[in-house]
Image (tube, rainbow, N blue to C red):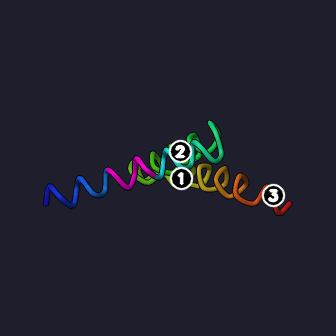
Amino acid sequence: MPALTLVGTVVALTAEQLLGWTYGVSGVVGLLLLALGVTTRRPSVSSAGAVVLALLVARPAL
């Protein structure tokens, strides 16, 4: 069980660093809002984070 927790933590930190490197501060804020909304079970906060991330990803296509 500790190995699974360690792997999950490494994956989360890697995703955060990659997102911060690619999309900057707004990408980290979007990921933080999404994670915070999911953990606190507040759909409005997680939706705001998802919208921020979707806008960052779709920006080159717009």
Which residue: 31% across, 50% down?
A: 9
Which badge, 3 or 1, comes first in the chain's sequence?
1
Q: Quadrant of the C terminus?
A: bottom right
User: In the rendered view, does 45 fall on the left or right side of 61?
Assistant: left
What amino acid is at disc 1? Ser
User: Which mark, by number, is residue 62?
Assistant: none
Q: Are marks 2 and 1 in contact (CB under 8 Å)?
A: yes
Element type at mark 2: helix
Would residue 6 appear left or right of 24 to someone viewing this image?
left
The residue at which mark 2 appears reads as 33
Mark identifier at residue 46: 1
How many residues crowd mark 2 within 10 Å: few (<14), some (14–19), many (20+)?
A: many
x and y percentages locating residue 20 in the rendered image:
57, 42
Residue 2 drawn in magenta: no
Q: CA distance from mark 3 to mark 1?
A: 23 Å
Q: Position of residue 38 (x, y in %)?
A: 44, 54
* Disc 3/disc 2 C-alpha distance (Å): 22 Å
Q: Give the extent of the magenta segment.
A: 10-14
Which of these two is toward me, 57 or 41? 57
